[in-house]
Amino acid sequence: MANRSSNKAAVPEAKSALDRFKMEVASELGVPLSEGYNGDLTSRQNGSVGGYMVKKMIEAQERQMSGQGHTQM
């Protein structure tokens, strides 16, 4: 099945970094995410990865805005 996602990155150059970040978060959470097809994962598993990514990005931005140094994702 072809990938028909309508999601487009605001900064296309960041796609590979976001993909690496997604795999790192999935690994931290114990979600068996792999390159390619992941239709065998539950919505809960996929949602936990996306939700945790957002949480970490918000925390990094808050640190940056408060002047607490470099951000880590």
Image: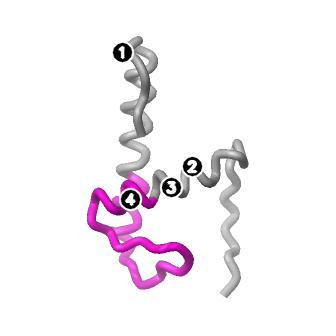
Query: Which callout, 4 or 1, points at the residue further toward the start of the chain?
Result: 4
Q: CA distance from mark 4 to mark 1?
A: 26 Å
* Residue pointed to by mark 2: 17
Question: Does 25 lie within the magenta span?
Answer: yes
Task: Say how the picture is coloured.
Answer: one colour
Tell me which corner region of the image, top left, top right, bottom left or bottom right, holds residue 27: bottom left
CA–CA distance between discs 1 and 3? 24 Å
Residue at the farthest top position = 67
Q: Quadrant of the C terminus?
A: top left
- Mark nearer the viewer, 4 or 1: 1
What's the amino acid at mark 2? Ala
Q: Amino acid at mark 1?
A: Gln
Q: Earlier in the sequence, mark 4 or mark 3?
A: 3
Q: Helix or strand or loop: what does disc 1 sit on? A: loop
Q: For the magenta stretch, what is the residue range?
A: 23-51
Are discs 2 and 3 less than 8 Å apart at CB?
Answer: yes
What residue sits 36% from the left and 61% below the top?
A: 26
Give the Cα distance between marks 4 and 3.
Answer: 12 Å
Q: Where does residue 19 sit, x and y in percent of width and height?
A: 54, 57
Q: Which residue is mark 1?
A: 68
Tag 4, which secondary structure? helix
Please rate how many residues cluster around mark 3, counting C-alpha atoms within 10 Å: few if below 14, some from 14 to 19, many from 20: few
Q: Are marks 2 and 4 in contact (CB under 8 Å)?
A: no
Q: Residue shown at 55%/51% (left/top)?
A: 18
| Callouts 4 and 1 close, C-beta under 8 Å | no
Give above or below for 49 relative to 71. below
